[in-house]
Image (cartoon, rainbow, N blue to C red):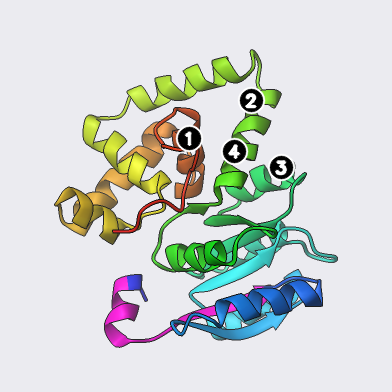
Amino acid sequence: MSGGERAATGRPIRVVIADDEPMVRAGVRAVLTTDPGIEIVAETGDGREAVELVRLHRPDVVVLDIRMPGADGITAAAEIRRTGATTGIVMLTTFGEDDYILRALSGGANGFLIKSGEPEELIAGVRAVADGAAYLSPKVAARVVAHLAAAGAGGPADRRSAAREQVAGLTTRERDVLTLIAAGLSNGQIARRIGVVEGTVKAHVSSILARLGVANRAAAAVLAHEAGLTTGGACAGGPRA
């Protein structure tokens, strides 16, 4: 069920939480349940069980700790994607886990949040991903871009130049849509913002991902940040339509 269909029926966003630290799980639950539009349907401390809970409950969003014993969040996310579930995946991370974040980006995660972030950011991230958008905590985005720059030949300037060259291959409308993707807007919100039907936005998004050579909206958002399309240093969590 899409975000628009869910809103039309009045059904809350159904969430599964997976984190091996009971206090963290309790904190995530406490924050999310302050929003009457969010319902926690299950929780676990194990990545493998998280996959089974997604199969069982078909939630709108699963919040996964990026590192757990047994099956970590990256492994669980990949397995969830292989099952064909449309559940949005939000990864919880801490500072110093940049390599894990990059692996999760390529594995199909839709959102990334820092555990030490503001409670409002957790709710915003879950809501954005439930609506089909990408959501990157500004702190996560900044660290990923810095990590990519440090790992890439030639340093930050070369990566910035390469990202701008990639973005330059997009049409003006596609660049506008990419900027809104990076701001955390869903297809429906982008459609209303630029005055077109949602099907047109979907076509633009497919073209953008293909032209940029990235697998998903979250990776496209990182590239937009590298290219300087975003404002204020934030790669997501910006204005909501």
Q: Which comes sooner in the sequence, label 3 or label 2?
A: 3
Whether residue 112 sits left or right of residue 165 in the image: it is right
Q: Which residue is mark 3?
A: 98
Q: Position of residue 12 (x, y in %)?
A: 43, 84
> Which residue reaches farthest top?
154
Q: Position of residue 174 (x, y in %)?
A: 27, 37
Q: Which comes sooner in the sequence, label 3 or label 1?
A: 3
> Which residue reaches farthest right?
69
Quarter of the C terminus within the rendering: bottom left
Q: Nearer the viewer's eye, disc 4 or disc 3?
A: 4
Q: Amino acid at mark 4?
A: Ala
Give the distance between the C-alpha atoms of the residues marked 3 and 2, in whole angstroms.
12 Å
Mark 2 secondary-structure assignment:
helix
Q: Amino acid at mark 1?
A: His
Magenta range:
4-17
Whether residue 99 sits left or right of residue 208 in the image: it is right
Name the residue located 64 percent from the left edge and 85 percent from the top edge.
42
Q: Which residue is mark 1?
A: 225
